[in-house]
Image (tube, coloured by chain):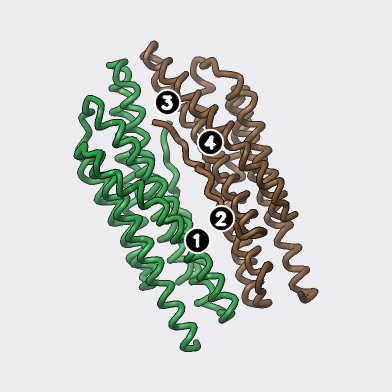
Chain colours: A green, B brown
Amino acid sequence: MSLHLQRDLDQLRKEILELGSMVETGINNAVRALNDRRPELTQSVFDAEQLIDEKEVLIEEYCLKILALHQPVAVDLRFIVVVLKVNNDLERMGDLAVNVAKRAVFLSGQEAIPCPPEFSDQMAKSILAMVHDSLDALVKLDVEMARRVIAMDDAVDDVNRQMYVVLQALMRDDSTAVERATSLLSTSRCLERIADLATNIAEDVIFMVEGEVIRHNTDSELS
Amino acid sequence: MSLHLQRDLDQLRKEILELGSMVETGINNAVRALNDRRPELTQSVFDAEQLIDEKEVLIEEYCLKILALHQPVAVDLRFIVVVLKVNNDLERMGDLAVNVAKRAVFLSGQEAIPCPPEFSDQMAKSILAMVHDSLDALVKLDVEMARRVIAMDDAVDDVNRQMYVVLQALMRDDSTAVERATSLLSTSRCLERIADLATNIAEDVIFMVEGEVIRHNTDSELS
């Protein structure tokens, strides 16, 4: 591999981690705003949206530049194609964080809904770990770490299912709770989709390294 | 452009249209199963899921092969990168059609919920047109058609918003309707996400042809 290609790929790894870090911060702030009822934390999430979009465009352009300039093959080519997909996934995570933030603003003005601790404590931690570790697995080509990310998705799906049960029961018991329960369900689903996107990244890492196609059944959104 | 590259790009266009057609059929069957309460129509949607996944993998491999063999530049390179993204978007649409189909099976065993005609008649038609036209715009590099796809998204978002209003009111009035109303809301949201993905494709077409970054605010999911 030429030194120039090596240098450009290093830069690409740096860029995608930076984008990942922006997205992680957004998710973290959105979830804290939601759980701690602190709507003021959402402003940074809304402000970051455009920066994330711009960074996504820059990274895609950078990938195109590397492809055109160096015409990489084999593992380098596959890495760039995976980065293009991951880039897209991260931008979507950013959109989902904005969605959670919007609901957090609405919900902070409403009567609080008691949540199972698996949602308010565990789910956000798991999701942030999944996003972070999937990107770590990508830049280190670490298949074991990618497998651990995929394994974490089931627990997130379980919590999302539990939220459906809890919140549907609440809506049946208290008709005045319908709007805020629907809103909270929406945040649970957004978080579950973020976990799905991290799982996609992990699957792409495994495919890149081992050539094995993994299709974890990520889409378990309930009725 | 070499004749070989020309031939491979033609084949790639054919493959992505075939995948699009599989996905359109899935969406159409899922929506008919839902609206006409015909759960037997969903089996083909579930059966097609694996075929769609396999086709997505094949198309990605084909893109990698073209990149490695022909090392295309400029507009051909950009086209392949867009196809990689579209390929991903189509697979996700297939997953969403499966989600709609699952809800259709559940809902067909429940008391029917009266829906606004904008949902049961118009929304599915608009979405199928958006998916079809976005792919047509891609293979014809037709920017005007892409712009029409983007313009259609607002009406779909409006219907989804209307469904939130109607179904939240139903849940407030009738506590026994909570589960089926939540389920129907989920289908509305899945359809809205399919429209968002078609909008993404249309935006990519415009960017590919004109270099103009368009970020239509696609994510209008309500609380």
- Which residue ends up furthest to the bottom in the rendered image? A2
- Decide which of tag 4 and tag 3 comes sooner along the chain: 3
Q: Quadrant of the C terminus of chain A?
A: top left
Q: Residue at x 40, y 56 (%)?
A: A51
For mark 4, name the chain.
Answer: B
Q: Between marks 3 and 2, how big is the CA–CA gap?
A: 36 Å
From the viewer's perspective, tell me whether residue A105 is left or right of residue A94: left
- To the question of a shared chain for discs 3 and 2, the answer is yes
For mark 3, name the chain.
Answer: B
Q: Nearer the viewer, mark 3 or mark 2?
A: 2
Residue behind mark 4: B192
Q: Between marks 1 and 3, how big is the CA–CA gap?
A: 36 Å
Tell me if residue B82 comes above or below residue A162 in the rendering.
below
Measured as percent of width and height from the top left, residue A156 is found at 32, 45
Tell me if residue A88 comes above or below residue A187 in the rendering.
below
Q: Are marks 1 and 4 in contact (CB under 8 Å)?
A: no
Q: Between marks 1 and 4, how big is the CA–CA gap?
A: 24 Å
Residue behind mark 2: B213
Residue behind mark 3: B182
Amino acid of disc 1: Val
